[in-house]
Amino acid sequence: MLPDRKDVTMEVGFMDAYVRLLIQTCHKRKVAAMGGMSTAIPIKEDPKANEIAMAKVRADKSREVTAGHDGTWVAHPPICSIAMDVFNDGPNQYHVLRSQVVVAARDLLDTSVKGSITEDGVKGNVSAALETKNSLFTRPPSLLIGSKQCVSETGLHSHCSLSFPRSESPKYTLIGEEFQSAERTS
């Protein structure tokens, strides 16, 4: 199992590997590599909490532009100015080819993430999984859970972190650089 969602950041190994591979693949094909959505949103009723949240957004967008992303996704209109400030150095970064990047399947599968599994984290995952699955049928594709902006993928991530303990996870086996179903390898 992965630790609590708060510990599974974009800096952990498998997330960093996917970002490097995404940028390399997109730029090789002259396609914009888009960054993701920062979950922090403006907090109107608490100026101090808002300042902290916006600093997290700026750090997230700075990480994206440093990695080589060409643009980003924002979830809330006031975040646009932060994203524009960070991404304002040019129209794209197609020149950042990341040709030195070598990402193997094992890098994308390495779920050894520092952190802990807590009761609050499990409850948060259950809540996020249920709320986002419910929102697929009743609300727009993004919603607030606590003070975080979430999308339907959040529910999938939350559900997966609850569903697949490490001892049961190999439904597919890594052979060379390809995944094969467990039935095919036995």
Image: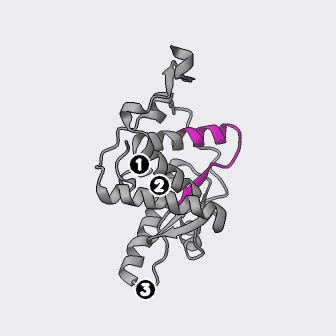
Instruction: Locate residue 50, reporting x and y percent.
Output: 42, 78
Asked if the residues shown at circle 3 and circle 1 are in contact, with their CB atoms under 8 angstroms apart, the answer is: no
Q: CA distance from mark 2 to mark 1?
A: 9 Å
Residue nearest the viewer, comparing 168 with 50: 168
- 166 displayed left or right of 160: left
In the image, what residue occupies the spot 47% across and 44% down?
A: 15
The amino acid type, in three-letter code, at marker 2 is: Arg
- Looking at this rendering, what residue extends furthest in the right direction? 30
Relative to residue 28, is residue 77 depicted above or below? below
Instruction: Tell me where residue 124 sits by quadrant.
Output: bottom left
Q: Is residue 160 magenta?
A: no
Closest to the observer, 98 or 184: 184
**Residue 54 against residue 152 in the figure, above or below:** below
Q: Position of residue 71 (x, y in %)?
A: 62, 57
| Three-letter amino acid code of the residue under disc 1 | Glu
* Magenta region, residue range: 21-38
